[in-house]
Image: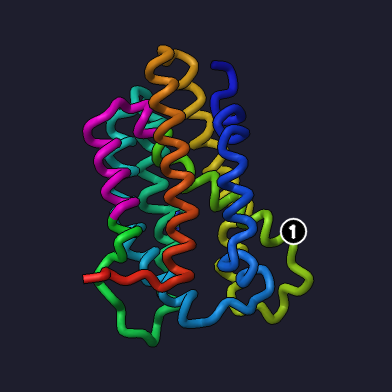
Amino acid sequence: MSDWFKQVRENTDNIVHEIKNHPFIKGLIAGSLPKDVFQFYINQDALYLAEYKKVLATVGIKCHAVEETQFFLDAATGILAVEDALHKTYIKDLAFNTVPSPTCELYTSYLARITANHSLSEGLAAVLPCFTVYKEIGDYIQANQNEQANNPYQSWIDTYGGIDFENSVNKAIAITNKYAQSADKETLNNMELSFTKSTKLEWLFWDSAFKKEAWKI
Ligand SMILES: Cc1ncc(CN)c(N)n1
């Protein structure tokens, strides 16, 4: 498979389309997203990223080439340090809720299960939407903003629309494409299932934040 990512991205276009049209994203573009909703999201995202760091490290230590391992370990510390700083900016005065929402729990548990029990290729495919969806949404928001000056969410938006994040996303895509190139048909099928599931979970994460999802019992 010469460009695995291009193919699976095309096949998940409907999900990305739904993300772009979600009221959460529309609210970020306009800067009108209610503050309590964004803070709920940032709080849940901090809980998500704490687990995602471990997942990236797990994938990294399974990679065959030392520079691939290094990339994922750097991603776990470097990129996430930037995100942690964003989280501190936006939730500084708030009581931090340490309970993951059902969707946060679902997404992190799913990633942990795939990276622990399935093949490296499937693990790479499962963690990739966390890079690619945010890059695409960051770019999409920046391209569709009428005004950036007074948007309270601009530093969050610029983190994902920026060049540093783009470099890291391209590297993650290149590594995953490389493993896809030597994967058999069954593995390719499983990789696409993982990529699609994580892309759906990205939609669900924003949707659950918009609804400030709580445990029903
Ligand atoms: C849920 C989620 N997915 C992806 C990202 C971008 N690393 C994030 N911060 N949060």
Q: Quadrant of residue 6?
A: top right
* 111 part of magenta stretch: yes
Q: Amino acid at mark 1?
A: Ala
Q: Quadrant of residue 65?
A: top left
Quadrant containing the C terminus is: bottom left
Question: Is any atom of residue 122 visible in this view?
Answer: yes
Q: How is the image coloured?
A: rainbow
Q: Residue at x 25, y 72 (%)?
A: 98
Q: Which residues are magenta?
A: 106-124
Q: Residue at x 42, y 41 (%)?
A: 197
Quadrant containing the N terminus is: top right
Assess disc 1: are there few (<14), some (14-19) or many (≥20) residues with their C-alpha within 10 Å of its C-alpha. few
Q: Which residue is mark 1?
A: 143
Q: What is the magenta segment's predominant secondary structure?
A: helix
* x then y, percent, for residue 75: 41, 47
* 63 part of magenta stretch: no
Task: Pick the residue in front: 167 or 25.
Answer: 25
**Is 100 placed above or below 173 here?**
below
Q: Residue at x 31, y 71 (%)?
A: 214
Q: Is mark 1 within 8 Å of ligand 1?
A: no
**Is 149 placed above or below 128 here?**
below
Question: Is 172 displayed left or right of 2 in the figure?
Answer: left
Tally the numbered discs: 1
Q: Residue at x 46, y 29 (%)?
A: 192
